[in-house]
């Protein structure tokens, strides 16, 4: 039995009576997910990342405050800081904006100033 798709001249015929063709068709599992080389390379690169070590210098009062906060949670200061970093930056607030000041003030300390829209441009319906 020969199978020809839509009698298109560009499509080769499949000879289903040929044992080799049948074997190839049976061995090619179309439902099996194809391997994504780029995804595998990315996952391998992530697994090979080495942990970063960060040195932090704190004042005496900052250290005392962190020590108190950590002791409330029965943690060391290191464990407390790591849990807070995970909680505040790495696990949540995925869409949290990182804009802290208008672009014309980049590099300038803005100490609590808010980003505002130009006045007179807001429409009230």
Image: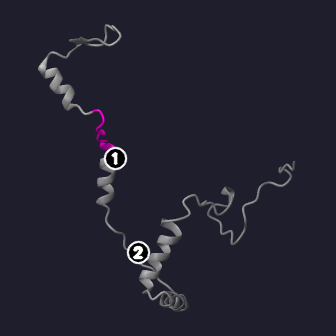
**Residue 54 shown in magenta:** no
The residue under the point 14% across, 17% down is 18
Q: Residues within 10 Å of mark 1 (few under 14, many from 20)?
A: few
Gap in angstroms between the C-alphas marked 2 and 1: 29 Å
**Residue 36 shown in magenta:** yes
Q: Nearer the viewer, mark 2 or mark 1?
A: 1
Question: Which element carries disc 2, helix, strand or loop?
Answer: loop
The residue under the point 30% across, 13% down is 11
Name the quarter where the N terminus is drawn: top left
The residue under the point 34% across, 50% down is 42
Q: Position of residue 96 (x, y in %)?
A: 59, 61
Q: Which mark is residue 39?
A: 1
Which residue does the numbered mark 2 point to in the structure image?
54
Query: Which range of residues does the magenta coloring cover?
Result: 30-39
Q: Residues within 10 Å of mark 2 (few under 14, many from 20)?
A: few
Q: Position of residue 24 (x, y in %)?
A: 18, 26
Question: Which element carries disc 1, helix, strand or loop?
Answer: helix
* Relative to 32, residue 116 above or below: below
């Amino acid at each position: 039995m020969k199978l020809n798709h839509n009698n298109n001249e560009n499509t080769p015929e499949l000879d289903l009576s040929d044992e080799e063709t049948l074997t190839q068709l049976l061995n090619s599992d179309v439902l099996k997910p194809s391997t994504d080389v780029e995804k595998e390379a990315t996952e391998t690169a992530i697994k090979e990342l080495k942990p970063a070590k960060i040195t932090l210098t704190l004042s005496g009062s900052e250290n005392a405050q962190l020590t108190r906060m950590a002791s409330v949670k029965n943690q060391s200061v290191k464990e407390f800081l790591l849990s807070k970093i995970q909680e505040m930056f790495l696990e949540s607030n995925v869409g949290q904006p990182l804009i802290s000041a208008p672009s014309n003030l980049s590099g300038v300390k803005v100490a609590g100033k808010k980003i505002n829209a130009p006045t007179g441009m807001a429409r009230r319906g």
